[in-house]
Amino acid sequence: MVKVGIVGLGLMGGSLSLALQQHSKDYYFIGLDHNQKHCSEALALGLVDEVCAGLDRLQECDIIFLSIPVDGIISVIQKLDNLKKDATVIDLGSTKEKISLSIPSDTREHFVTAHPMTGTEKFGPSSALPNLYKDKVVVLCDLEKSGDYQESVAREIFTAIGMNIVSMNSKEHDRHAAFISHMPHALSYALANSVMEQEDSQSIIALAGGGFRDMSRIAKSNPYMWEDIFRQNQTNLIEAIHSLQSELKKCEKMVERKEWNNLNEWMTKANTLHDILD
Amino acid sequence: MVKVGIVGLGLMGGSLSLALQQHSKDYYFIGLDHNQKHCSEALALGLVDEVCAGLDRLQECDIIFLSIPVDGIISVIQKLDNLKKDATVIDLGSTKEKISLSIPSDTREHFVTAHPMTGTEKFGPSSALPNLYKDKVVVLCDLEKSGDYQESVAREIFTAIGMNIVSMNSKEHDRHAAFISHMPHALSYALANSVMEQEDSQSIIALAGGGFRDMSRIAKSNPYMWEDIFRQNQTNLIEAIHSLQSELKKCEKMVERKEWNNLNEWMTKANTLHDILD
């Protein structure tokens, strides 16, 4: 029996348990969440075999996942001690540099810092999905600082649940993630608020089609989780927002100056993203 | 047999035929498209019973749909003549004020200007979907200028294919559409281009998850169609872009100044959009 500790029984932690249960019956899950309702829900949904109140029980775990907001991850990392000799601790935070730097050097080899590029705008144990991780990318960062054994455990687990592994250093990751995930969240929140600010917002929203629904979906995301991410990736996020602002300004100017051919070219260039993306 | 003319055999026109065919066997479809490949595809796919080369054949139609880019709609409207006494002409353009104003007063009662709030980023006859219109909103504009009979024909048809009808004046429509559809398209194009502009765009795009895919989906949209829409709704579009820029600037400043509580409140406000939207 492999004992798996899951700190944070929300969308990411819950889905991970469901995915691992599909893969093998050999796991025993010990869950931990500061929200008591989440603990009972996770038990009722079969996401964990038991829940515990403090970090002490993690000392008997072979693998520990930290699936809580990024500030929480840094705080829990400082408190983990007396880990099993071969324990592997994998955090699933959306930012990586500050987390990686926060790990004490004497326990560094136990840790693998990972960012699964998946999620939904939902949260809590009831949002867990067995296929959330399947066919998605997971970024493993600063692997040279992890123990060889711990790296192999992490690779095995992410492969088992169907993920494609990419590795890079945490600095590079945070810059990339700002463009592909964090800034788009800022944009979606801004879009939602720009419509809500209009006098006749209700009549406007009544006309929403698929495009607007897609663009505003991630504006449902949890503010506490995203406040943390924005805080931890402040500099890169601002750079990515500036880049977006500059493109939007180009568009605005072309429309204002009636430069329709240039606008068409700009849109055609945007089309080419999908030659790479799909 | 009701003779239906469809000018423009792309996503919108093709899907309309599929929807009407599901509703009744009583329609005979005559199609028209300046693209010969679209004509043969539409015939092969059963979207139309026959295709014709010029507008003359529309003189025998009971109902005519104009499902072409908005500049094309204005041009075709000027050329339609000798319509059947009770003919109903329905244009499906994404902007409405300029189209409505362009209709000659002596034939005005034949026309119903409509904007179905649906679509996908795909185009051409092969992108047609039988349920594209189902459970979506269609906005009918300036109905006081349409004949009573023509209004009733339009209402019947849109109801038959499962749409929810909203009516408003074309000026109001164009402002609403700028916020709920046109500006979000500008935003999606800007997002795609801001990532494509990065030195390491390929590595960034390799990390794309569901959020980015959703936000960039409509950046696949046809530049020729959207150039027209941006041209026809220039003033409202610029206003909507300014509103978005102002919200994004707020976000940027809060992140820069580390005003995390304010940022959290701003995100929480964005969350409330979905109390109205869902």
Image (cartoon, coloured by chain):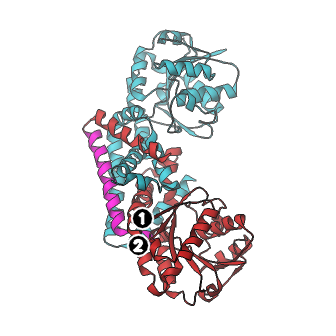
Chain colours: A red, B cyan
Q: Is residue A62 left or right of residue B111?
A: right
- Residue positioned 45% across, 40% down in the render: B220
Q: Is residue B55 left or right of residue A130?
A: left
- What segment carries the magenta color? A228-256
Chain letter, disc 2 residue? A
- Local packing at callout 1 (Cα closer than 10 Å; few below 14, some 14-19, many 20+) is many
**Which amino acid, mark 1?**
His
Q: CA distance from mark 2 to mark 1?
A: 8 Å
Residue B245: quarter of image = bottom left
B249 versus B221 height, above or below:
below
Kindly indicate whether the residue at mark 1 contacts the one at mark 2 (C-beta within 8 angstroms).
yes
Residue A239 is inside the magenta segment? yes
Residue situated in front as seen by the camera: A12 or B64:
A12
Looking at the image, is mark 2 or mark 1 earlier in the sequence?
2
Q: Is residue A266 left or right of residue A202?
A: left
Q: Position of residue A57 (x, y in %)?
A: 64, 87
Residue named by callout 1: A173
